[in-house]
Each structure stands twice: as structure tokens, then as C-alpha cells.
Image (cartoon, rainbow, N blue to C red):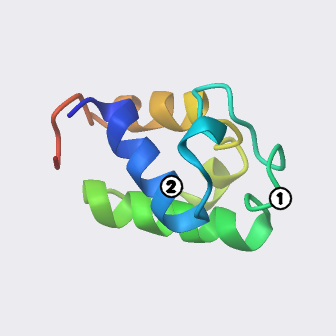
Amino acid sequence: MTLIDQIRDVFLTELGIPPEDFSPGLAYGAVPEWDSASHMVIVTALEERFGIMFESEELVELSTVARIEQALREKGISDGHGA
């Protein structure tokens, strides 16, 4: 399973959005379901899934799916990890 597929699973599960609403370009606030409270739920789910921790200053940078993917790759997470 690719990294973007794993991120997609987290978003669909935690936000309950339809699959067609998910894309790498999806940004915070672009769907009503991705608000400040659900942002923390997503971050926690990603941390648990990948066994990593985001620093508090990183949280504001995680504003798009593409940026989340980049941040995970910077932490050494790659395709197939944690699948």
C-alpha cells in the first residue's frame, strides 16, 4: 500500500468524507469535516499509524494532504510502511 493510500485511509476513516473528496491537493478547511478539532484527530491517527510524533510547530504546516505526505517522508516513512 502506498503512503498516499495509507493517508487516504486515515482521512476517510477519521473525517468520514466520501472517497471522491480526497486528493493530494485537499487542504485544511476545504471540506467542512476538516476543521481544527478533526485536524488533531487526523494528526493523532497518523502518529499512531506510523509510530511517529509531530512537534507542535509542525502541526500548522500539515495544511494539505501533499504536505502531510511530505512531512511523513521527511520522518522516514515510505510506501508500504505500516500497511
Foreground of the two, 36 or 19: 19
Residue 43, x across and y down, in percent: 53, 61
Task: Classify residue 2 by image quadrant.
Answer: top left
* Number of residues whose C-alpha sits closer than 10 Å to that of mark 2, classed few (under 14), some (14–19) or many (20 or more): some
Q: Is residue 7 above or below residue 55?
A: above
Residue 49, x across and y down, in percent: 29, 60
Q: For the residue marked with disc 1, what is the amino acid?
A: Pro
Q: Is residue 79 above or below residue 50?
A: above
Q: Residue tagged by mark 2?
A: 12
Residue 28, x across and y down, in percent: 77, 46
Q: Secondary structure at mark 2?
A: helix
Query: N-terminal of the two: label 2 or label 1?
Result: 2
Q: Residue tagged by mark 1?
A: 32
Q: For the residue marked with disc 2, what is the amino acid?
A: Leu
Residue 11, x across and y down, in percent: 52, 53
Label placed on residue 1: none
Residue at position x 42%, y 44% from top?
A: 7
Residue at position x 47%, y 68% from top?
A: 44
Q: Is residue 56 left or right of residue 68?
A: right
Q: Secondary structure at mark 1?
A: loop
Residue at position x 66%, y 62% from top?
A: 39
Q: Is residue 5 left or right of residue 62?
A: left
Quadrant containing the N terminus in the rendered view: top left
Residue at position x 27%, y 54% from top?
A: 50
Q: In whole angstroms, how far apart are the C-alphas of marks 2 and 1?
A: 13 Å
Foreground of the two, 50 or 20: 20
